[in-house]
Image: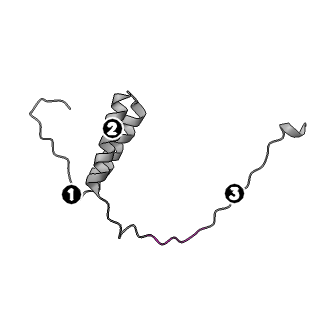
Amino acid sequence: MLPFLKRKQEAAVAIPVEIESDHDEMEFDHDEMLHHCVDELIESIHHKDKESTLEALKSIFYILDAEPHEEGEHIEHGHEGDEY
């Protein structure tokens, strides 16, 4: 077999590393993050960029979901017969 047709073998090594994290002590300004995400959302809609719009909406969801709230059953607040 010609040398340039041979598959190269790659090796990977995983080394566990303990990293100290101040994540619990970090405070995030949720309003500032939301403003940034909304700016990204508006820009992506303006440019008709579906992928960026999806990412901005996901980011907004995750930020709002991180806010303190009670987990539980979802309650619909619509009228009977309305489809969502």
Mark earlier in primary sequence (3, 2): 3
Q: How many numbered tags mark residues here?
A: 3
Residue under numbered circle 3: 12
Residue under numbered circle 1: 69
Real-space CA distance between mark 1 and mark 3, rounded to the nearest whole angstrom = 42 Å
Q: Quadrant of residue 84?
A: top left
Q: Which residues are magenta?
A: 16-21
Q: Residue furthest left?
A: 79
Q: Residues within 10 Å of mark 2 (few under 14, many from 20)?
A: many
Q: Is residue 34 magenta?
A: no
Above-or-below relation of 42 to 33:
above
Above-or-below relation of 8 to 15:
above
Residue under numbered circle 2: 41
Q: Residue at x 74, y 51 (%)?
A: 10
Q: Is residue 58 visible?
A: yes
Which amino acid type is shown beneath numbered disc 1?
Answer: His
Q: Quadrant of residue 47?
A: top left
Q: Residue 55: percent from the left, percent from the top?
A: 39, 40
Mark earlier in primary sequence (2, 1): 2
Query: Residue 43 has which mark?
Result: none
Q: Is residue 18 magenta?
A: yes
Which amino acid type is shown beneath numbered disc 3?
Answer: Ala
Q: Is residue 65 visible?
A: no
Q: Is residue 69 left or right of residue 42?
A: left
Which element carries disc 3, helix, strand or loop?
loop
